[in-house]
Amino acid sequence: MSNSIKWIIAIFGLIVFGFSLYNASWIADEPEGEIVLIGHGSWPLPVDKQDCIIDAQLALNEIAYNADVRSLRTIGAYDADAVKFESELVGNQLLIPRPPKTDCAADQNRPRSTINDAISAMSALEIFLPLKAGNDDKANAMIAALTGKTYPNQVWVYGDDDLTQKVANAIPTVKALPITAARQCINDYKSSGWYGSIPDSCAQGTAIITLDDGFTLWGWPNRLMQRFAENDVEIFIVKDIQDGAIIGLDEVNSYSDIPETFVGNIWIDDIKNLGPALIR
């Protein structure tokens, strides 16, 4: 082998080593922050022999709540840090769901609460409100409901890219999680991350990582998290994306696929079992 070939091999090896070191997670600072478990509502409430909600169960710390709000607040018992819930456009108001499994006439006649009532009643939790493509009326109602309101908790809208950005642009205190764009951010990073570049598709400020991504990501986990934090990009770990919808974690053993040093958002579909199971 000639000396020139040896030099080429040596230089190539140094380049590969340099890029490997540049993307090495173990030499990056350990990320600062907390895990945010995002669970779903609503939850069944205790009922009497007639299968009607027991009114005494609607009080919490001597504060009485409507049944639908109390149903959402139940998620706090499962160590959730955030709650995602649907809403229904009735007239010009967005109302939250009734508690599940409430078929008695008295429960069906109970007053329903607005999304504003729910957000105010869950000040310790982040709020995630979905918007699907074609829900333009719901997006407009959401803007009307949230404009001018201030809450101690962070409110998110997630789902369709255009509608979530529309709401977030109209209300600066609301954050958007546009699913397609957030997923594109990670797909593009797989191509550009080897030289430390954060792609333009991450400019919307969110990134969705599935459990299957794992070590296909340059600098995962610590180096990647450092880069994204420096560029104000929030990371969401999910089980999968199917037909444009987020599929959350639903098995406790899924936690083994998430690095111990991870800090950020974890989307949970079975918060009742996975919430208490995450102990760090």
Image: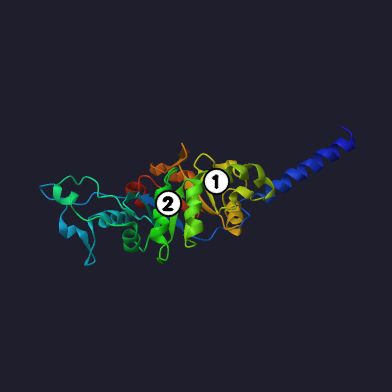
Q: What separation in Å lies between label 1 and label 2 (alpha carbons)?
A: 18 Å
Residue 134 visible to an observer of this rendering: yes
Along the horizontal axis of the image, is 75 left or right of 265?
Answer: left
Considering every residue shown, the one lying at the far left of the view is 49
Circle 2 crowding by C-alpha within 10 Å: few under 14, some 14–19, many from 20: many
Q: Position of residue 239 (x, y in %)?
A: 45, 41
Disc 2 target residue: 139
Counting residues from the start of the chain, the first of labels 1 and 2 encountered is: 2
Image vertical order of residue 5 relative to residue 73, above or below: above
Disc 1 target residue: 181
Along the horizontal axis of the image, is 155 left or right of 17?
Answer: left
- Element type at marker 1? helix
Locate the C terminus and report the quarter of the image it occupies.
bottom left
Locate the N terminus and report the quarter of the image it occupies.
top right
- Residue at image location 18% in from the left, 44% down from the top: 103
Residue 278 visible to an observer of this rendering: no
Q: Position of residue 15 (x, y in %)?
A: 76, 45
Residue flagged by tag 2: what amino acid is it? Answer: Ala
